[in-house]
Each structure stands twice: as C-alpha cells, then as structure tokens.
Amino acid sequence: MKIIQLFGISAFASLAFLGSCKPKGTETAVSGDAAEKVYVAPGKYDEMYNFVSGGFNGQVNVYGLPSGRLLKVLPVFSVNPENGYGYSEETKPMLETSHGFIPWDDQHHLDLSQTNGEIDGRWLFANANNTPRVARLDLKTFKTVEIIELPNSAGNHSSPFITENTEYVVAGTRFSVPTDDQNGDVPINSFKENFKGVISFIGVDKETGKMDIRFQLQAPAVNFDLSHAGRGKSHGWFFFSCYNSEQANSLLEVNASQNDKDFIMAVNWKKAEEYLKAGKGRKVKTKYAHNTWNEETHTATSEMKEEVTVLDVAELKDICYFMPTPKSPHGSDVDPTGEYIVGSGKLAALIPVHSFSKMLKAIETKQFSGEYGGIPILKYEATLHGEVQKPGLGPLHTEFDGKGNAYTSMFVSSEVVKWDIKTLKVLDRQPTFYSVGHLMIAGGDTSKPFGKYLVAYNKITKDRFLPTGPELPQSAQLYDISGDKMKLLLDFPTFGEPHYAQAAPAELFTKNQLKFFDIAKNKHPYVTKGEAESKVVRQGNKVHVYMTSIRSHFAPDNIEGIKVGDEVYFHVTNLEQDWDVPHGFAIKGNQNAELLIMPGETSTLKWVPKKPGMYPMYCTDFCSALHQEMQGYVRVSPAGSNVPLTYSLNNKADNAQSPVKTAVTK
Ligand code: RUQ
Ligand code: CUA
C-alpha cells in the first residue's frame, strides 16, 4: 500500500477520487471459454508451478497454474507450526541472525536459478525485507536450505535478483544506514553525511548452490527499490532503481517526491570484480549469520561471520553510472534481449525505456550532466530509447513475453498495459481488480520467457471474494496472453501480501524431485535406524529419547522416570522408505510445535514438563487406518523421586523392546 500513501490519501479514497479507476463490468471482462482454460480435471496436474512471495507471512507459497490451486506453503523466514520449521531443534538455527533468533519476516521477491539466461529448476532465492537476509530453497526437496544475513543493510527490498548463470544473487538496501564499521548512534538528520546505500553481491557455487558474500558496493545514501540483472548483451551489468535522491530522512511521501527525476543506477559488476581482485576493497568488521541446512544430518548450523569486503563506488571510478529516470522509479526491468531497461516511476505519467547500447555509447563519449555522490550522471536523452506515452497511472512493474511485448502494472489506474518494446506503442489494456502491484509471466524476467500466462498480484480485493471480516483475502488474477488481447481467466486468493513471483513448466521441477530421504544415508547424530536401537539415555537433567516411528507406532511408546526439571529431547526417526508417509509427533504441554518427520529423516522436539503427571504423545499426521492408535505415554514424577527411568514397547510381547528396559545413564 506504500504507493497510495505517496498521494497522501487512503487507497479507497484515491480510487473514489480518481473515479474511473475502479473498472466496471467484471462479468464482461471474462470471456466465455475462461473456465475451460483454467479447469484442471480431478487427478490431472497443473501445467506450471507458480512460486509466490508470501509478503508479511514470510513464506513462499506454491500454486499450480492455470488452476490457481494452492499446493504448498514453504516455510522460509517465519516459523511454521504445520511442520515444526523454526520449532524443531534442527531447524531453529535457520532463523538465527546477528539480532538473535527471528521468527518472522516480510518476503517480497523471488528469483529462480538460471543457466544461460534460462530457468534451470534447481534453486529458488527469496528475500527477507525487514531483517535483511537472502534464502535459498532447494527445489529437489522444496526446502529452505540456506539463509545468509546481509551486513551494512536495512530493508532488503532490491533483492534477490540473479545474473544469467546464477553467478550472483544481488541485494540492494532499501534504507540507507551508517555502515557497520561506523558509529550508528548519530542524529538521524545527519543522513547526508553518515548514511550509505550498500549493495551485496552474493556468490553462488555452481555445483552446490552455496552462497557467500563476495563483496559489497558502497553507494550514496538513497533508497534502492528494485533491480534486475543485465542479460545477453548486457550480462555483466546490473540495474537498480532508486528513490529519495533528495536524501530526505522524514516525511518521504512529500520530501522524497520533489525531484523530477531519480535514478536507475547501472552497475558494471565485472569491473567491480577487477577492483576486488586488485585488492581495492576495505575490510569492514561486522557480524552476520550464515545458516546452512545439511541434508545428511538433517540439521541446520548457524555460523557468525565477522568481515565483509566493501568497494566504495565514489572512489573506484567506472563501476556505477546514474541514468535519470522520472519520478521515484519502482520496477527496474530488463527485456529478454538485454537491450532495454524499463523504469517504472510510481508518480510518472509515462514509462521511460533506456537502451543499453546507448548507455554504453554515452559512457564512452562522456555524455554526463553532472555527478551525484561522486558518481557520474548520464544525460537522460543520451540513454533513452524512448517513452511510452499515456500508459496509465502509477506504473510499477514490467514483465516480458519473449515476443517483443512488455506488460506493465498500473497501480493507480488498476490495469495491465501491454506495449511494444521497440515502437513503444500501447497495444492493449485490461483492468485488474484492484490496484495491481507485481506482474508475473512464466520466465518473464529471463532470456526465454514461456509466455502464455500472466498473473497480476493485487493489493486490494474488496468485493472479489466472500468477505472475511475486516481483513480480506489477498488476490491474484490469471490472464491468457497467448493472443493479441489479454484475457482475464481466473481470480484466486493468496496468502498475504503477494509481491513478486516466478513460474515455469512443471517438468523443470518434477524431474529431479526427491520422494523420500534414504535412511542408510541419514547421519543425524541421534538417528535410530531400527526399533532394536531405540533407547533412552539420561545425561544429568537431559534425557535423550532415541525414538522411531513406522506405521503405526512409536518405539518406545511408554517412558517412565522423567522428572520435573528434566529437559527431554525426543529424537524421532521416521523409518518409512516410501513417498508421502510422514509421521507427526506431539506431546501434551509441548511449548513449541509438532514435528512432521519425512520418511528417512530425524527431527527433535524439546520438551520440558512443568509438573508431575501422565503425558500422552501421538502422531499428528493420519498415516494409516490405525493412525489413531499411534500414541504413547510419558510418566513424569516430582524432582527427586526415585522412579527409575525405563522405556518399553509392548512390554508383554516377544518384541525387541521387551521387557521394559532401563535407560542408560551417562
Ligand atoms: S514491491 S508492488 Cu515490495 Cu516488489 Cu512492487
Ligand atoms: Cu503416524 Cu499417524
């Protein structure tokens, strides 16, 4: 909703104020064959996966296209009680930061890994906006496997955007702040002297995907909003939109909307690499967490890093150039050929399109109109390919279909506008319901878009779905873009608030998908590879339960001799070796969340009973006809009681666990 606040009036007031902005005749906006085009018959698969940012729910949500069916919520930056992410002992380190454990974030943008400018289906990158972090999800398992915190940053909005071979995932700070080696305890109105806008270049290992911050660029204090990598001919460059070239530190809706033009900052990252190699960076002492998931131990570790290399772009010439861009640009989008860079000025009445080749020429012939923070400003006309005239009101984001067309979201006039990249002529416009933010075409920010569908992610849904109290559902709308005219096909609700999204044909992700974890390869330190190995071990007041689960019982399922004051760790290994047979685990009074353990995996629930009594535990996931029988008891005695610590499964039968066994005490 940030855009509308720039107008100083509420969203609805503005729609009313602009009158025509709320499109009429929703029925007529849908053509007759829409249902057929989105209908995926029971038992049939969708054509594409659509990964949608969760916004303030902090997760990534996976939908099928064209049906709009929600397939899964993938936990990334927020704890997720549904499967124990952020609650189990193994996953807690994923959410560690230099500020301690953070259970939430605001997730805006996603980018799928690419090879030669095309989506390769390996990884998905996600940003955390509030406590600056970038996550990597492995699309073999659809799990978050790595999170890296970004030092010298605040409000990681211009992130995570990747280069065409996933050399880098890049993150620009929205808020400029004093860098971590400077004293941050300074007056806010010393913004101009003390604040800096820092951009992180995170290297991605070609084989493993492992991230590490190779370098950061220290740029003048502005607000970096969005970015995209150059591709094809502009590979080696990155383009960042920024607002607040006024360098205001208060009432930005007015004070950062003064200048007629702000900038798109073009960054020559290959040049930056040269400076880095030549040792031109300054080592900045800082602290940032790097959390990695180990697929063999099924456990995350968090490491605190202490140093980062920063290149000062005001000192090191020819890394950065400013391209003036009208009125607080938001989206910075590069077309599939890499030639055109589209800036969407939230307050602009036109859409400027910069030309990469003109930009190179302008740099070469020094067509500068001045400097900003030590960085040359290129002349607007010198880099401009042209302007789309009268596109609509409030342009935000642009996507491409690979056929020479661009599609821009118009927040204020609530529409998607299709235009020709070369001629800049508007070709079509269709209403959105309402106030569209991001757009997404499958592969729409790569060298090879898949076209066919466009999804609009809207900021306001009023009157589109059954109302749900003051907080209405969030929404997406699917358009068919295969013809000359866009056709609205479907509305579907989403988790809120959706921002950027990615999509690609399903085969790219199904071909390598893992169905279960091989238990023979499980290297969890507390793994139990068979019921005969299950046991209970006391170490002082810590009790480790080596537990197994298989349809439909736990081993052991009776435990006695736990005392108030004990810390109990249930290390549950799911012995199943079959697709789609998770088991859950919960025990009365557990103060975290359930565990949901995948076949072949081990997860740990910490439990600290507060009073003596009988505590049932059970499997939470309906796993067989006798799922309801998958249960057990833990007896808790007062501190100091002499009930021996014992455990059993079926204490009468000729079972490996029989008779009752006494726990080992170390
Ligand atoms: S933003 S609605 Cu956070 Cu990507 Cu433009
Ligand atoms: Cu295991 Cu239900």
Image: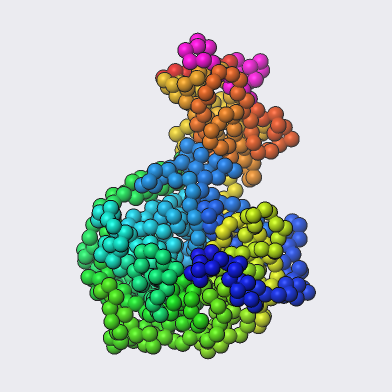
The x, y position of residue 381, in whole percent, is 39, 88
Mostly what secondary structure, the magenta segment? loop
Residue drawn at (70%, 29%) of the image: 629
Residue located at (59% from left, 48% from top): 515
Residue 524 at least partly seen? yes
x 62%, y 25%: residue: 616
- Residue 120 drawn above or below residue 373: above
Residue visible at 34% across and 85% down in the picture: 379
Residue 79 drawn above or below residue 55: above
Residue 339 in view:
no
Residue 39 picture quarter: bottom right
| Numbered circles on residues, count | 0
Q: Is residue 549 magenta?
A: no
In the image, the segment drawn in magenta is 632-659
- Nearest the viewer among 557 and 9 is 9
Q: Is residue 636 magenta?
A: yes
Give the left or right position of residue 624, taking residue 513 as reference. Answer: right
